[in-house]
Every structure is written in structure tokens, then in C-alpha cells.
Image (cartoon, helix red, strand yellow):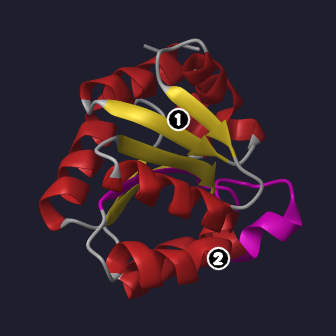
Amino acid sequence: MKKAAEILEGLKACNIGLAASVPCVNLSSLLKCIDDSEIKHVAVSREEEGVGICAGAHLGGMNAVLIMQNSGLGNSINALASLDLLYNIPLLMIMSHRGVENESVCAQVPMGELTIPLLNDLGIPYLEIKGGDDGKNAVLKAWECAESQQKPSAVLVKPSYWKKVSE
């Protein structure tokens, strides 16, 4: 829970008022922290639905985050391109980066390999966090980028981020 609380601290520091999410086992501790916080949490059935809800929150004056697995990036490309990128809507995306670091589910590997090229092709800046990295700082940097550039920005959370780091 310590690493999830670290990301939650970053969300609070960015004045995030709404979190839309699609379930992901790697992000379950973060979603639990959000549920226990003052941030309004909306579970969505598809990632592009989350893009739309977050855009509506922005238009209503609220900072929002979309929390999803990286495979959901493929599902949300049209919404990101024809809504957020077209209309300069900042969006913070926190994505578990599946399909990397000795992934045990072979179906996760293709999107794991395509995630960064897709973000680059869309012109969406991203940060990667792994074991030992500061999740709060990454969230702050990504949100600052989304706000200053008025477009989506992502934090890719590697599986090793959640593992305990020996000191």
C-alpha cells in the first residue's frame, strides 16, 4: 500500500477531483486508496468512456485522472485523438505497463511492446516508474506536462514499481 499511497499523494497534490478507472490487478491497491480518499472514483467499462468522463470533468473545472492498464490505450486512441488532443484537454493517465518485465501472460506482450511507440505516435508525453522510483514526483511531473501542454500525459507503472526494494 505504501507505493499506492505515494501515487495518491501525487494525485492530491495535483488537485485531482475525479478518477475514472478500468479494473487492473496491478493497480488494485491504488484504486483501494482512491476509494478511501476524497477523490470521486468512477468505474468505467471501457477506456474511451473514461476519456470522455475525464474531459467532461475538465470542462466542468475539475482535474481528472484516467487509471487503466496499458492495453486500454489501444481502446482509447480515437477518443484521445478526436477529443483531448483535438480540443487541447489536459488528462493525466496512470497506466500499469503490462507485457514487460518477464510478463507471465503472453497475450499482454504485444501491447506491452506497442505502448511506448503508440504514445510517441500520438505525441503523448510519458514517464516510466519502476522499483525505487518516486511515484508522487512522477505524477506531479506528468500533470504539470499535461497542464502546460494542454494534452494528455501518462505515467507508465512498471510491475517492479510495486515490488519492495531492498535498502
Q: Say above or below: 48 vs 20.
A: below
Left or right: 80, with 147 as reference point: right
Looking at the picture, how far across and down is residue 128, in whole percent?
A: 41, 52
User: To which residue does mark 1 refer?
Assistant: 161
> Quadrant location of the C terminus?
top left
Kindly identify the amino acid type of the residue bearing the numbered disc 2.
Gly
Q: Earlier in the sequence, mark 2 or mark 1?
A: 2
Alpha carbon distance from label 2 to label 1: 23 Å
Looking at the picture, how far across and down is residue 92, in whole percent?
A: 38, 51
Judge by depth and name the residue closer to the eye, 104 or 34.
34
What kind of element bears circle 1? helix
What kind of element bears circle 2? helix
Q: Say above or below: 83 vs 24.
A: below
Left or right: 8, with 99 as reference point: left
Q: Residue at x 63, y 28 (%)?
A: 31
Residue 113 appears in view: no
Residue 89 appears in view: yes
Is 136 within the magenta?
A: no
Q: Say above or below: 6 vs 152.
A: above
**Based on the displayed image, in which of its 4 quarters is residue 30 positioned?**
top right
Asked whether the beta carbons under mark 2 and mark 1 sit within 8 Å of each other, the answer is no
**Based on the displayed image, in which of its 4 quarters is residue 106 positioned?**
bottom right
Label annotation for residue 139 = none
> Quadrant location of the N terminus?
top right
Left or right: 105, with 21 as reference point: right
Looking at the picture, how far across and down is residue 127, in whole percent?
A: 35, 55
Kindly identify the amino acid type of the residue bearing the numbered disc 1.
Tyr
User: To which residue does mark 2 refer?
Assistant: 74
The span shown in magenta is 90-110
Q: Say above or below: 85 vs 62.
A: below
Q: Residue at x 74, y 44 (%)?
A: 24
